[in-house]
Amino acid sequence: MSVSVTPNPAARKFTLDRRLADPSSRAFQSATEAAGDPLAAALFQLPGVRTVFAVEDFVTVTAEADASWGRLSPAVVSVLQEQTR
């Protein structure tokens, strides 16, 4: 898995080494919206996650303004590894 910065400093792109089980484009603005999607729901359990976008083989996470990527990025990687086994 690789983590890339994006033009938006509040977002990071997490590229997986495999396709997602559901490769269709999915965007979630809240934990409530993500309730039916196990991957997105797990990401929204992390403090600081504001939005989740998933498609094909990558997930983009946007963080809350006060979130630290130093803490959030490893947590996102951990969730993605667990959810994409």
Image (cartoon, rainbow, N blue to C red):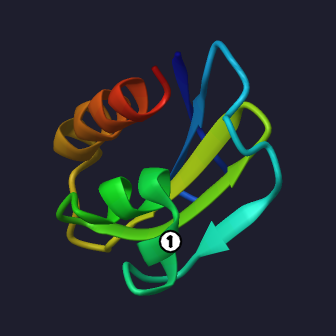
**Residue name at image x 21 percent, y 37 percent:** 70
Question: Where does the image place residue 61, in percent across and percent down from the top left?
Answer: 50, 55
Q: Quadrant of residue 78?
A: top left
Q: Secondary structure at mark 1?
A: helix
Q: Is residue 72 left or right of residue 21?
A: left
Q: Is residue 36 above or below residue 19?
A: below
**Number of marks:** 1
Q: Residues within 10 Å of mark 1 (few under 14, many from 20)?
A: few
**Residue name at image x 42 percent, y 75 percent:** 35
Q: Is residue 44 above or below residue 17?
A: below
**Camera-side residue of 69 and 2:** 2
- Which corner quadrant holds the C terminus? top left
**Residue name at image x 50 percent, y 84 percent:** 33
Q: Is residue 14 left or right of residue 18?
A: left
Q: Quadrant of residue 76?
A: top left
Q: Is residue 62 above or below residue 20?
A: below
Q: Is residue 69 above or below residue 83?
A: below
Question: Where does the image place residue 68, in percent across and percent down from the top left?
Answer: 21, 52
Amino acid type for the residue under numbered disc 1: Gly
**Residue name at image x 21 percent, y 58 percent:** 46
Question: Where does the image place residue 54, in percent across and percent down from the top left?
Answer: 66, 52
Q: Is residue 40 left or right of residue 79?
A: right
Tag 1 residue: 36
Question: Where does the image place residue 48, in percent across and percent down from the top left?
Answer: 24, 66
